[in-house]
Amino acid sequence: MSERNDFGAFLAGMIVGGALGAIVALLYAPQPGEEVRTLLKEKSVELKDRAASVSGEARTKLEKTVAQLQEQVAELSRTLQEQVVVLKERGSKASGEAEATVEAEIRAEVEQALDEAMNSASQDGDDSAVEAW
């Protein structure tokens, strides 16, 4: 944004400076009034054409830059969308793996608790508790 402001200020300064320089040069030149007016008119047309040319070039350059930036943003957007899909897949896979791990740990703990309960019951001589399991 700042570069556009700087360029616009430079362009305006160049145009105003050129116009003032042409006017001062014509006014101090030793020529009759009619020639000065004609020369001023020619220089003003020339300056107007030059300003139109410079502004046209600036517009073209700006449009090209905007198009390039739009392409870059679109590419970054596609890349980010692809990354989101990959990360979702990784998260889903990790979640499934974690669920399986937790389930296996719970089964192991339940089996261990059952084994301990059965061992404890058989050591106490309580066969009815063992048969219930």
Image (cartoon, rainbow, N blue to C red):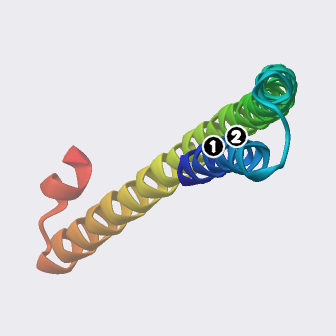
Q: Amino acid at mark 2?
A: Ala
**In the image, residue 51 above or below residue 5:** above
Q: Residue furthest front?
A: 32
Q: Residue furthest bottom?
A: 123
Q: Nearer the viewer, residue 25 or 92?
A: 25
- The answer to which quarter of the image holds residue 112 is bottom left
Q: Nearer the viewer, residue 55 or 116?
A: 55
Q: Position of residue 51 (x, y in %)?
A: 78, 29
Q: Position of residue 131 (x, y in %)?
A: 24, 49
Residue, x 79% and y 33% (percent of image)?
58
Q: Rate crowding at label 1 as few (under 14), some (14 to 19) or many (20 or more) other CA atoms within 10 Å.
A: few
Residue, x 71% and y 44% (percent of image)?
27
Q: Amino acid at mark 1?
A: Val
**In the image, residue 130 above or below residue 71:** below
Task: For the residues labelled 2 and 1, say whether their Cβ atoms are less than 8 Å apart.
Answer: yes
**In the image, residue 78 above or below residue 97:** above
User: Is 125 on the left or on the right of 14, as rendered?
Assistant: left
Distance, label 2 to label 1, CA atoms, is 5 Å
User: Is 2 on the left or on the right of 60, as rendered?
Assistant: left
Residue, x 42% and y 62% (percent of image)?
105
- The answer to which quarter of the image holds residue 57 is top right
Residue, x 75% and y 36% (percent of image)?
69
Which residue is under mark 2? Answer: 19
Q: Position of residue 45 (x, y in %)?
A: 82, 19
User: Is 108 on the left or on the right of 61, as rendered?
Assistant: left
Which residue is under mark 1? Answer: 16
SS at circle 2: helix
- The answer to which quarter of the image holds residue 79 is top right
User: Is 16 on the left or on the right of 41, as rendered?
Assistant: left
